Image (tube, rainbow, N blue to C red):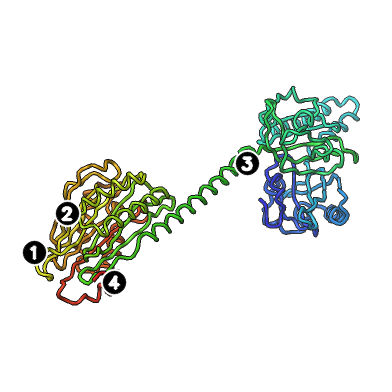
Amino acid sequence: MQTAGAPSWFRVLQDAAFVLAGVCAPDGTLLAANRLAVEECGYDRAEVLGQRFWETGWWSADPAARERVRCWLAQVAEGGQPVRAVTDYALADGTVRTADLALDHVADEAGGPGHVLVTGMDVTDRLTAERTAAEAATRAGDVEALRAAETRLSRALALSERVLGNVADGIYGLSADGRVEFVNPAAVATTGWAADEQLGTDQHDLLHARRPDGSPYPRQECPVWQALHTGRTVVAEDEVFWRRDGTPVPVTLIAVPTVEDGAVTGVVVSFRDLTDRIAARRQAAELARVTERAAVERALSDRLQQALLTPPPEPDHLHIAVRYRPAADGARVGGDWYDAFLQPDGATVLVIGDVVGHDSGAAAAMGQLRGLVRALAYAADEPPSATLRRVEHAARGLAVGTLATTVLARVERRPDVPVTGTRRLRWSNAGHLPPVLLTPDGSTELLTTRADLMLGVDPDAPRSDHVRDLPDGSTLLLVTDGLVERRDSDLDAGLAALRTALADLGTTPLEELCDRLIDRLVPPGQPDDVALVAVRAYPEDRPRPPEAGPNRLPPGVS
């Protein structure tokens, strides 16, 4: 209901059920108006907002009323003096009604020219009933007319009571000395004080005598008291009423004076309980803080992973390609890793692993475990199973408390064949997915063996090695479960899909093969990260093919 340029405090009046309300710029442009003033009067919001207030349909029935309203607005905007007047106004269907109108100047907290707040209470039924009663009373003996007037007055009062009883906002009617004259059910429910406990009491002393921190709240600083003693409508957004049980309830309120013959006779106070709104704001702020912390944690973990997942070497006889794709869910941090490096004797070491967990702790543990494997395997003249046992003991001694699956593999030349002969793959599997081999004839094979216990459970658990020839033209693939494991299918189906895709892409250049495998097998929104190492073996007696890229070796390795 609020338009651009309307002050934020006007939202207090937007849903007010008993008061016509609008706010104007100093030049009289209507910036906002509540539903009771616009839609309930039959107008379209686009017809009135942005127009000079006195040029709107409310004053179309009486040019003299239009001029009076224009002068009243100018008086309030220029001099700051409030205006109180009873005047007629028109509904969209031409019906003329009467309103007790109040125009008040509201200062701008930012130092601007401020606004003119226009509020009014429809008094048509009350005035009609009073006139009817007066006319009936002057006619001697006209008892029936008097009874009819009394009936209309009773109906008007009953209608007012029904309205007050059904609105969600709490409403008080106070006398000129601040005592409660009426209270609606919403106010009773919010404060916990029964209606008969409130009627006749000083509303400030009962509900409003303390600030939010419990310190005394002087009466002269209370917005309700200010409305009573200045005759101006007062809007307050950060007030506290105190319930019967002694607990505070945050409220926003509007206090509208009632004026008769130029004198303030009381004030109508409408208030809204802000407890739920404040709780929602706090929850939103806490969610924002949690989201921000998660984003920072994810960014740090991603940087850690990217720093650890280094480019692989490129020995002349092998082409090694690696990939890492983080989980789509930014709140999950993966523990997948890969590694590939050359030992001093020229053998190629390949590692794929997955630390249990999806948080910054998993990423940190992954970094520690990767460092241990790399350091212990670099110069080790031993089978992969022996290296994994040493990794287990080192992790236990260094308190690297984590669980992880891994495959540690070594590509080496067979000592019983010439340099140009078949290479050999030797590996040990600690609870990880099996390697996948694509042979030169286009067939695929899962290098399935009995997987040993995962790392981090028992450093003395037995570990075994496995050996397989790696012929020229073959491709070896080491992957983590993010590539093949899905919630809606079993792992065997995922491995079968991987074998099919690998066979279909068998002649594709290795770098492209890795990308196409991920695009084909990993669905959008994948909740787990993915790591893979792909190795293609080329004949050692031929030049390195262009698709494999340049030869890249560390210093001291030929």
The mark that comes first in sequence, 3 or 4, is: 3
- Mark 3 or mark 4, whichever is nearer to me: 4
- Using the image, determine if residue 267 lies above or below residue 520: above
Image coordinates of residue 21 in percent, x first then y, are 74, 47
For residue 475, which quarter of the picture? Answer: bottom left
Q: Amino acid at mark 2?
A: Leu
- Nearer to me, 105 or 331: 331
Task: From the image, tell me which residue sits under label 2.
Answer: 447
Task: From the image, tell me which residue sits under label 3.
Answer: 278
Image coordinates of residue 261 in percent, x first then y, are 90, 39
- Nearer to me, 156 or 291: 291
Q: Amino acid at mark 3?
A: Ile
Please report the residue visible at 74 percent of the width from the left and 36 percent of the height from the top. Answer: 211
Q: Amino acid at mark 4?
A: Arg
- Using the image, determine if residue 418 lies above or below residue 454: below
Task: From the image, tell me which residue sits under label 4.
Answer: 552
Please report the residue visible at 31 percent of the width from the left and 51 percent of the height from the top. Answer: 354
Q: Which mark is residue 495?
A: none
Callout 3: helix, strand or loop?
helix
Please report the residue visible at 24 percent of the width from the left and 65 percent of the height from the top. Answer: 344
Label 3 neighbourhood size at 10 Å, few (<14), some (14-19), many (20+)?
Answer: few
- Mark 2 or mark 4, whichever is nearer to me: 4
The mark that comes first in sequence, 2 or 3, is: 3
The mark that comes first in sequence, 4 or 1, is: 1
- Nearer to me, 68 or 542: 542
The mark that comes first in sequence, 1 or 3, is: 3
Callout 2: helix, strand or loop?
loop
Label 1 neighbourhood size at 10 Å, few (<14), some (14-19), many (20+)?
Answer: few
Image coordinates of residue 9 in percent, x first then y, are 72, 48
Label 2 neighbourhood size at 10 Å, few (<14), some (14-19), many (20+)?
Answer: some
C-alpha distance separating marks 4 and 1: 27 Å
